Image (tube, coloured by chain):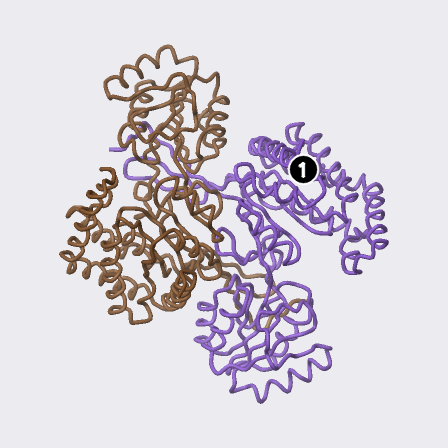
Chain colours: A purple, B brown
Amino acid sequence: MTIAETMLAQAKAARAAARFLRTLDTESKNAALAAIADRLERSRGKIQEANAQDVAAAKEAGYPAALVDRLSLTPARFDAMVRGVREVAALPDPVGETIKRTVRPNGLSIEKTREPLGVIAVIFESRPNVGVDTAALCLKTSNAIILRGGKEAARSNAVLAAALSEALAESAGPRAADAVQFVSVPGHEAVRELVRLPEWIDVVIPRGGERLIRAVTEASLIPVLKHYKGVCHVYVDESADLDMALEITANAKAQRPSACNAAECLLVHRAVAGEFLPRVREWAAGAGVTLHEDGQDFSREFLALEMNVATVDSLDGAIDHINTWGSHHSDAIVTASDAAAERFLRDVDSAAVYRNASTRFTDGAEFGMGAEIGISTDKLHARGPMGLEELTTYKYRVSGDGQCRG
Amino acid sequence: MTIAETMLAQAKAARAAARFLRTLDTESKNAALAAIADRLERSRGKIQEANAQDVAAAKEAGYPAALVDRLSLTPARFDAMVRGVREVAALPDPVGETIKRTVRPNGLSIEKTREPLGVIAVIFESRPNVGVDTAALCLKTSNAIILRGGKEAARSNAVLAAALSEALAESAGPRAADAVQFVSVPGHEAVRELVRLPEWIDVVIPRGGERLIRAVTEASLIPVLKHYKGVCHVYVDESADLDMALEITANAKAQRPSACNAAECLLVHRAVAGEFLPRVREWAAGAGVTLHEDGQDFSREFLALEMNVATVDSLDGAIDHINTWGSHHSDAIVTASDAAAERFLRDVDSAAVYRNASTRFTDGAEFGMGAEIGISTDKLHARGPMGLEELTTYKYRVSGDGQCRG
């Protein structure tokens, strides 16, 4: 088989498995998730052995330390991965839920119900736990998943794939086995072929760095749920409590600088800049944060202890700056003025907008979704943290007693 | 300016106008819609004169009669167009609505609110009223719109464009003028450039035949809301009331065969085929409907008084047939069995699924949405008839009193 044929065969098998998943009730799906968690625990030795080989090979190949770290399935990460599967089982099942019901004057009853998307392809980089995390979310929502991991994690992913697929088949029957598939064909061509099957795959979710996400989005004929980057802002308004402003700035920038919801740019109203900026400089010096007060590339995502700083003349100036240079991810205003806060929350065109809180809260768990498959800065379908509901679509179920259109 | 530069300038102006629209309240938007309706009425003579020139030129160029008919803005169609604008003004405004509100244990209040998409490009064919209809829906939802009509309607669209833009500027101020723009650059290149501006345009909606929709979708780097075609089914189950089945078949096929929600294929359970098919043949002969009982190309959309017919061995066979050959638009079961109906409604993977009713009801007005910008057979964002809500996205507005992430 050519690579294209292999991808098509996997996608068709996933579609058939998705149709079968749709017939399972919540209890059966939860049982399958529990079986997967059990199986992962029983296979821990084999999985960690394969992972150790991946890690050793990556070190030998001279991969950067950060990649080797992400690749490594430490005992704590293994535990968290298994716990994650059990937590997804415990979440409410959105599939089949009635979103809206209307009865029309002609007696037709129209029910809008939540339905699985169908087949989801997840393309990720080094972290092997991403495959298990996303598979659990997809199974819970009756979606089949096709996983493509980084080549550096090939051994880990092969063992994880076998564990998932076997546990599924044992728990839910052989027709469920193809509901979780890994793509083992090496090379970029496999991904390019995979994302060109819009009849068989409903959504592509790339998880990784901006380069991976851009490459997938440009090649894909299938809709992609994604965010490229997080260029998040903290705007300190003229009426801000400056103690609070400093705390929020420090948290948004430095609590976890590698996160997409960390702030990359501090905007300060001119009226308070004279008082506030010296305090920011003092904090930055102590926290090891480099401030770029010359403001050169405002669209830059540092993902590090660096931050752009700019002074603005007005609330409007801050909103314009954010809408122009930001990435529509998460942006905060610190203010004591209700009017300023309301203007900011309405007019900043981002997935999450904050009043007197840190941008770091943009996260499925922090938002109370229980789990997260990613964060979207797109406007169609899903915006912000994506949980179980965002892995569903809807349909209209219409019931009548013979109604015809006049 | 090159075509690419012209398109970019229009898109940027639309983005700026969209930001301005977001600051208007519902009353101002409704006043602008009323001003547009008034202006259209006052300009009726000029518009109909331009339209008469388009119609005359199309006839002279030998365009097909169906196209000339669609192009023609008859007095009745003109009235309906103006009435449509006033009806949109009377609908509730979804923008700003709170979809969900939660307060997290740390005191953060998270409000999920409905927001405009931003800038919408609508690419349509001959019918000039589509520009006005879609502009009204976009304005109501605070979205700017860029319209590209067929070249055969260029004179009509130029006059309509001027009327809309002037009425908007007079009613809502000059910053609103660019919220409705027509693309007047001729040729396909303009469309190709337009759909390659994902930073400035949020959604593309193609309205017209399958060829137009495919061409736009393939060229676009912007998400497209669409349906290619409607290959809709009526399945007559073994327990069906055959009188009802015949009425629904006749209505779904023949009440308006050119509509996308008209049925193209009749599936009959083997157990009732002997009794039901002769009645279908009799009806078809009387109604001038050609039945294709040899079932050759089951994915064909006739849009005419023609229909495929097939016998299936079971409910499962019908569901498989529909999921394999259908277009995921609208499909109906006629049955007296609750169990069969529930299986069909759950397992047929279509935007609208019907029990004992005609597929012809898939329509924004029939579903109670008040208006419709199109019908989607995609699964992301919007599925089925798309009304005002489907022209919105959401954002998370988070309010705190200094919360930082621990």
Q: Quadrant of residue A154?
A: top right
Q: Quadrant of residue B377?
A: top left
Query: Which amino acid type is shown beneath numbered disc 1?
Result: Gln
- In-front residue for pair B366/B42: B42
Left or right: where A194 falls relative to A322:
right
Please give the chain letter of the residue carrying mark 1.
A
Residue B297 location (% of width, % of height): 43, 24
- Looking at the figure, which quarter contains the N terminus of chain B? bottom left
Q: Quadrant of residue B119?
A: bottom left
Left or right: where A156 falls relative to B139:
right
**In the rendered view, would you say A35 is above or below B215?**
above
Q: Label 1: which residue?
A: A181
At a point 65% along the width and 67% down the height, the residue shown is B405
Residue B364 location (% of width, % of height): 33, 44
Q: Residue extending furthest left?
A: B45
- In-front residue for pair B90/B286: B286
Residue A12 location (% of width, % of height): 59, 32
**In the rendered view, would you say B241 is above or below B58?**
above
Residue A162 location (% of width, % of height): 75, 36
Q: Label 1: few (<14), some or many (≥20) within 10 Å?
A: many
- Looking at the figure, which quarter contains the C terminus of chain B? bottom right
